[in-house]
Amino acid sequence: MMMGNTGVLAKLTELSNRLGVPSNDYVILSEGNTSARIDDMTFWIKASGASLRSSTERSFVRVAVHDILRLLDCSDLKDDELRIRLDNAVRPEDGVPPTGRPSIETLLHAVCLQAADVHYVAHTHPSAVTALVCSNHFAELAARPLFPDQIVVCGQQPLFIDYADPGRELALAVNEGLNRHIADHGGPPRAIYLKNHGFVALGSTAREVECITAMAVKAARILAGTMAFGGPCFMPDRDVHRIAYRSDERYRRKKILDEDVIPFEREQNA
């Protein structure tokens, strides 16, 4: 069960600030966006142009999920019309007008938040991951895990999406990919790689999407490092399956993703 509206927004704001820490190299300027489900009807989305690092609770906009999802069926919408429809989907909190407008990626977040057990979504542009998704054969390189903790945190099988125009077209592509992935694997992916664009983490908690993002960046750096030593040596499928379903690894994953654990940034500053 989701916590109260205020608690969700506080966790989303804290998550956004941590993802925006410059030393992470996940985003610069106003890159990236985050979202969190409030209930079945509404969710929070970062306002367009807001910085993740400096976001406050006023940097997020509450929108009606069904108004957003209906835009996927509007194939004839021009850019200006889409922007108006996004603005019309805003639901002011306690009657207070928002200070910003919904991100153009609100549609992407609406699609992801419909997946089972997904309550938080983080879309970032980490340099290490973006280098990977901007390379030739990126899906082949990132499709198989390299080390056990990558499986524990990011799952066995990520989702790869070919380049699509940010906004409605990208949301449609991700929606199709999610439906296919769920049909093939029984549930949504934890990680989505967007060709020539960036990375999306899906999770049930803010802590989970932060961990997924961090581990995906580490995996991308390790993959790049293997190129200096003859290329990657991927884990065999049987070993991947073994790690994914070991009871002790599932227990460890739960402990890693426990929201009571001290966040990364605080650990570094301790």
Image (tube, helix red, strand yellow):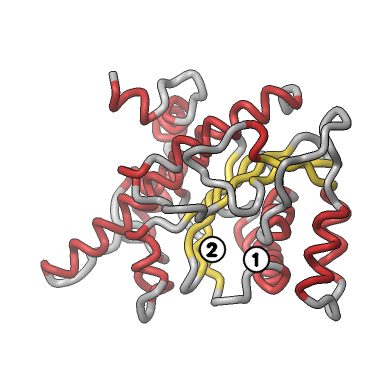
The amino acid type, in three-letter code, at marker 2 is Leu
Judged by depth in the image, the label closer to the viewer, 1 or 2, is 1
Give the CA separation, mark 1 to mark 2: 9 Å
| Residue beneath the point at 45% across and 28% down | 251
**Quadrant of the rendering where the N terminus is positioned:** top right
Dot 1 falls on a residue whose secondary structure is helix
Tell me the quarter of the picture where residue 146 sits: bottom left
Tell me the quarter of the picture where residue 231 sits: bottom left
Which class describes the residues within 10 Å of circle 2: few (<14), some (14-19), or many (20+)?
many
Q: Position of residue 163 (x, y in %)?
A: 55, 76
Residue under label 1, please give it.
174
Dot 2 falls on a residue whose secondary structure is strand
Q: Position of residue 149 (x, y in %)?
A: 34, 43
Which class describes the residues within 10 Å of circle 1: few (<14), some (14-19), or many (20+)?
many
Callouts 1 and 2 close, C-beta under 8 Å: yes
Q: Which of the two discs, 1 and 2, labels the residue nearer the N terminus?
A: 2
| Residue beneath the point at 53% across and 50% down | 201
The amino acid type, in three-letter code, at marker 1 is Val
Residue under label 2, please give it.
159
Residue 94 sits above or below residue 99 on the image: above
Front residue of this view, candidates 144 and 67: 67
